[in-house]
């Protein structure tokens, strides 16, 4: 198969869909890998790294789209890219179609087969191609929160780990899933005093078993949240109710209970945020203040560490990319129901229930397409 990887063109996107290491594996399996010139630069991979891996460099996105059987990307195709997709071509990338009727319409019109990273599942009910980015965002959250807490940035002027004779920062993490666990581990590693609040008892049992000596857990009732934020220097928002907007767990009135200059880091901002006063910010201008409380609400946190994020994403996508290339999408999806869960569009038909529901469009059962294909 000819696997093509264009340069990402969404503003501030520095990741790349295929790493040199993934290219090398694909070439070893007998595939041709076509990389757009300069596609890996933002993530620290120059063209020479790709040619050393056996890939070919093409000058333009047009050439990549025109030649490749499968396009592997990071972000959803932008309007100009969607015009280059063609019937029978395979697209493997993040899509997030539910809130995006224009993209959905264009993908359906193109006749391509589109498999979305974010809906591929695993045997534990997890989302293996979303998890690496949650791991990155979780580990970044205390780092960005610690920066926000510095006096020059408007923060309380508190050092995460304290020093001998001075108590460490109090960090509260709301939501103990992938983001929350990684945030708590890093905050604790920086020497902070960390409590994770969640509503899932099985999850808190797990966290207590594994991290009992590192951080505490507490049930995320409204009363407990209100109590914990009064003493917190930093609150990390890391909740997720799959498919729904994030619940608002700290109201504007609650900010009055908090210590001036303390930091709210709302990682859940990509689902609307879990603090009432959160609004999405960018890496250029990441923080703002409301009622004396500093807010950090960057919606694409992994972009700050494009190289780590690219490698982490590449590690997760590579087995699926290879299965698609080795077997073709029909056989790969027939063999793996978790990959089939990623199928969103095929030959003008929408194949993902939640997207159809959100956009009021008819949905074809993906299993049926598999048999027909
Ligand atoms: N800003 C970014 O760049 C970025 C990057 C990656 C992920 N995210 C977002 O971070 C959020 C968390 O992702 P995740 O992968 O950790 O999800 P996850 O499903 O692994 O964890 C979510 C946790 O929230 C808990 N929860 C749900 N409702 C709660 C409530 N009311 N109170 C307390 N806990 C509650 C769940 O029990 C679960 O443990 C998501 O919104 C995700 O989209 C943002």
Image (cartoon, rainbow, N blue to C red):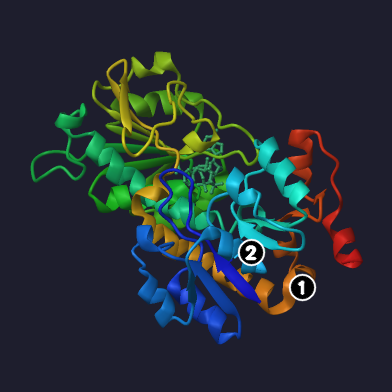
Indicate the quadrant where residue 271 lies.
top right
Indicate the quadrant where residue 122 lies.
bottom right
Q: Which quadrant is the C terminus positioned in?
A: bottom right
Disc ID at residue 335: 1
Q: Is residue 290 left or right of residue 55?
A: left
Label 1 beta carbon less than 8 Å to ligand 1: no
- Residue occupied by mark 2: 66
Percent position (x, y) of residue 57?
Answer: 47, 72
Percent position (x, y) of residue 165?
Answer: 8, 41
Percent position (x, y) of residue 81?
Answer: 60, 51
368 shown above or below 358: below
Circle 1 sits in a helix, a strand or a loop, which is it?
A: helix
Percent position (x, y) of residue 195?
Answer: 37, 41
Indicate the quadrant where residue 113 lies.
bottom right
Picture residue at 75% right of the left edge, 34% below the top = 359
Nearest the camera: 245 or 171? 245
Q: Which quadrant is the N terminus positioned in?
A: bottom right
Q: Is residue 136 left or right of residue 23?
A: left
């Amino acid at each position: 198969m000819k696997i093509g990887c264009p340069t990402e063109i969404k503003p501030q996107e520095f990741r790349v869909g295929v790493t040199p290491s993934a290219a090398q594996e694909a070439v070893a399996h007998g595939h041709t890998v076509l990389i757009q010139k300069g596609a890996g630069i933002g993530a620290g991979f120059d063209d020479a790294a790709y040619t050393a891996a056996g890939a070919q460099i093409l000058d333009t996105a047009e050439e990549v789209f025109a030649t490749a059987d499968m396009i592997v990307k990071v972000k959803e195709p932008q309007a100009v890219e969607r015009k280059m997709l063609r019937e029978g071509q395979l697209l493997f990338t993040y899509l997030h179609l539910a809130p995006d009727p224009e993209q959905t319409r264009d993908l359906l019109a193109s006749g391509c087969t589109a498999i979305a990273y974010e809906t591929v599942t695993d045997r534990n009910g997890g989302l293996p191609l979303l998890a690496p980015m949650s791991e990155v965002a979780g580990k970044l959250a205390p780092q960005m929160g610690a920066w926000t807490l510095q006096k020059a940035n408007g923060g309380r002027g508190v050092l995460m780990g304290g020093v001998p004779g001075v108590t460490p920062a109090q960090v509260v993490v709301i939501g103990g899933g992938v983001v929350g666990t990684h945030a708590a581990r890093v905050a604790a590693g920086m020497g902070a005093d960390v409590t994770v609040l969640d509503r899932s008892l099985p999850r808190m049992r797990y966290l207590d078993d594994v991290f009992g000596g590192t951080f505490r857990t507490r049930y995320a009732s409204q009363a407990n949240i209100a109590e914990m934020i009064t003493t917190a220097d930093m609150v990390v928002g890391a909740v997720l109710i799959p498919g729904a907007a994030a619940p608002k767990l700290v109201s504007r009135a609650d900010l009055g209970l908090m210590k001036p200059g303390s930091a709210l880091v709302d990682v859940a901002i990509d689902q609307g945020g879990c603090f009432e006063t959160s609004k999405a910010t960018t890496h250029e201008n990441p923080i703002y203040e409301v009622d004396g409380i500093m807010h950090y609400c960057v919606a694409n946190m992994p972009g700050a560490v494009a190289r780590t994020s690219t490698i982490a994403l590449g590690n997760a996508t590579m087995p699926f990319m290879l299965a698609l290339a080795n077997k073709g999408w029909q056989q790969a999806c027939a063999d793996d129901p978790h990959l089939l869960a990623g199928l969103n569009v095929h030959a003008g038909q929408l194949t993902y229930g939640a997207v159809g529901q959100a956009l009021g469009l008819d949905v074809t059962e993906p299993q049926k397409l598999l048999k027909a294909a």
